[in-house]
Amino acid sequence: MSVPLKTLLAAVSVAGSLLSNTRARADEPVALVAQAPVALAACQIDFSFRTVSAWGPSIAFVNGVDLRFSNQRQIEANEVDVDLAYNGRETTIVDRGRFAPTTTIAHSFDTLDGTVYGGSTPDRCRVVAVHYVDGLTWHE
């Protein structure tokens, strides 16, 4: 059976793209999944008002980040990494614990503290890695 060179090159290109997007260590099992196996349902910036001086006005500052997500895979996850960008600052939130399949997890994080509040919606908030108790790791 003969396969046209163009078709073969396209298949190699797709396979290479999938493999290069996994970015895992050589000793770490990797899941080749098109979308994150953890669904991010909410990513909200919290704030509080602070007075910057005794005679000055109160200003709203970031007071933390609330995340709500659920594990879509049928095995327990033990770490979810979320990439967050807000008002010119970037950080990765690493949430470790026991995240059962289909259970909604709601956690708050003290991150970006001191950043001037610019609304409850971050510029970017996405799951970039998930680690499972069976040793499997998914990377964006």
Image (cartoon, rainbow, N blue to C red):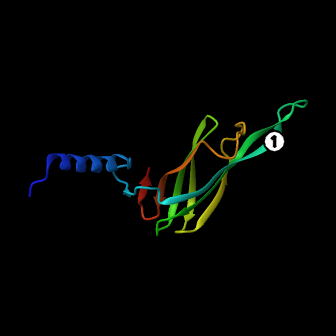
In the image, what residue occupies the spot 56% across and 64% down? 98
User: Among all residues in the image, which is located at the extreme right?
Assistant: 55
Task: Bin the neighbour count of mark 1 within 10 Å (Cα to Cα): few under 14, some 14-19, many 20 and up.
Answer: some
Instruction: Give 88 or 111, whichever is nearer the viewer.
Output: 88
In the image, what residue occupies the spot 50% across and 66% down? 76
Secondary structure at badge 1 equals strand
**Above or below 23: residue 57:** above
Instruction: Give 118 or 48, whichever is nearer the viewer.
Output: 118
Instruction: Give 130 or 8, whichever is nearer the viewer.
Output: 8
Q: Amino acid at mark 1?
A: Phe
In the image, taking residue 112 as reference, residue 80 lies left or right, namely left
Image quarter hosting the N terminus: bottom left
Q: Return the x and y of residue 97 as percentages of the image width and height.
A: 57, 61
In the image, what residue occupies the spot 46% across and 64% down? 133
Residue labelled with disc 1: 49
Q: Return the x and y of residue 44 as percentages of the image width and height.
A: 66, 50
**Above or below 22: residue 133:** below
Instruction: Give 15 or 23, whichever is nearer the viewer.
Output: 15
